Amino acid sequence: MKRKLFPQFALFVMLSLVLIACTLGQTPPALSTTQPQDTQLPAELPVTGQEPATEPPLNLAGPPPELGDTLLWVDGSLLVYIPPGEFVMGHGGEDNPEHVAYLDGFWIYRTEVTNSMYLRCMMMGECSPPVVDPSLPNLEDPEVANLPVVGLRWDQAERYCHFIGGILPTEAQWEKTARGPEGDIYPWGNAEPDCELLNFNDCLGEASPVIDYPVGASPYDVLDMAGNVFEWVADWYQAGYYAEAPFDNPMGPEFGDARSVRGSAFNSGPGQVSSALRHFLAPDEHRADLGFRCVVANAHEFAPPCQVLAYVPPDAQGGPGAGPGGSAECIVPEPTINVVTYCERQVRGNNISWSPADADINYSSSVGVSCSQYDADTLACVGDPGGTVEISACKSCPPPVVELGVLASCDPPYVLDEPAGVCRYAGAPVPGRDLCTPGFSLLTLPDTVCCEMQAGSPHDFPVCPPGGSYDQASRICWFTLPSTGDQKCASETVHFTTCERPGRDGGGSDDSCPPQYVYCFYTGNQRVCVCTQP
């Protein structure tokens, strides 16, 4: 039975965003699960020469955090603490035999690094842009802010982690986070994967915002450890490494030609999402379905960031207002339908009109009846006797736009700076927390100690829950909701009857009136035909 080690935190919603559709390159090569040592991402692995192994993460210093602790980090991410201890690594494959390993405690990103996080690093001049590819999203588009950043080489991912004071996770750190201490097959346990648990198997056909699958979280409540996008990790890849890896804090081989890649992606099949599977890719390669996350040492010793993104909770209740999409106020007129029936030279016809002219019209006709749009509010229909036209005219309020407020919320000890649209740190100094990560400097005020950016623009976007659209001019999240006004409709069945030949006095007779002078009309439900020539 799946057990969560700690509850969801309200702050996580700050990373949610209207899903917008974006095409993320071509479908990757199929991933093999029968020969894990050949489970590589490219069809052929380029040889890039020998490079030294990356430096290991530092052991945590100072009082150890506890299981379930989280920290808001400088780039708006949330760090989750993974406690020290043994865990089951590998799952009986040729390149991942099952064994027990030990790891010191570490902090890891709850989500994959997003476009908005990486964009901030670029604007500060600390990170280089992803590969130029028209299939990749524009990082400056607020609508893709919470999608995982992709299209990066290994060194670009590693550079970002150094920028925020961390490093890429080792394979061991990544696998423990994904599987928990007991070595579950999947992050959520051992149940078979489905589209409610993860973004895979082309359930969506593209990457999704990084907090969209909380049900499939790992035992430590870390998201997207399966599905969405693959992830770079720190280790060089070597097929036989697990068999010779040290028990304590395995760091991967010292040298190699390819870097390890873990996880799975939105286009991975059901047999490709086991958390123990290993993949690899040349470090100078990139993919549209490959991202990363970071780990941070000594995270609990750093001062808090001076500002973080404000957010709108997904269950926020705003009042109706006139927004970019329309107004919530509407008076619905009662629609009416008017029918004018005529017989002219033995042609049976009905002109059907409605009011108001912009009402929504639906109609269907029986066999032998044809209708054409005569005017903006009129149908001209002709047909055989006994034919019918079913028509309805409906009028309803346009969908109202609900204003959810200007960057609605901040979690303590942050307070909302409405003009800037961000949350400012307003807490008291924390003893012993007087360090900042690279790219940030310590700001010491009488009542506050926090880390602020040294250069560049934060490029912050207020984050709207799914379904919301951000209006940059007003800095407001707008939501189009179903109409709450009453819809009013009118309907009628229009019949086509036989055209009779009336007498000159209006009474029915056979040949007393030439056909070209016959005119028929309805008075209420009574049909009257007259001869127009005395």
Image (cartoon, rainbow, N blue to C red):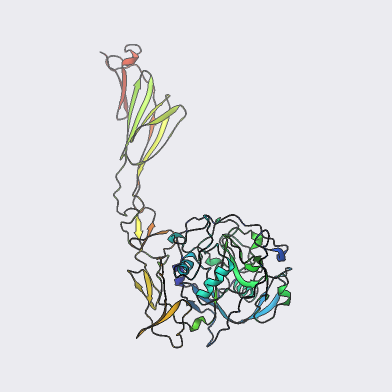
In the rendered structure, the answer to whether residue 500 lies left or right of residue 227 reads left
Give the vertical position of 493 relative to 146 (above or below).
Answer: above
Residue 1 visible at all? no
Q: Is residue 404 visible?
A: yes
Q: Foreground residue, 80 or 526?
A: 80
- The picture quadrant where one finds residue 276 is bottom right
Q: Residue furthest left?
A: 534
> Could you say which is closer to the camera, residue 453 or residue 431?
453
Q: To which quarter of the image does residue 373 belong?
A: top left
- Decide if residue 210 is on the left or right side of residue 47: left
Residue 73: x %, y % from top left: 47, 75
Quarter placement of the C terminus: top left
Q: Residue furthest front?
A: 49
Q: Give the residue drawn at x 38%, y 19%.
A: 346
Counting from the top left corner in percent of width and height, residue 203 is at 57, 56
- Of residues 502 and 446, the one drawn nearer to the viewer in this rendering: 446
Location of the N terminus by quadrant is bottom right
Instruction: Tell me which corner region of the image, top left, top right, bottom left or bottom right, holds residue 285.
Output: bottom right
All told, the count of numbered labels is 0
Image position of 377 with respect to 144: above or below: above
Percent position (x, y) of residue 248? Answer: 66, 82
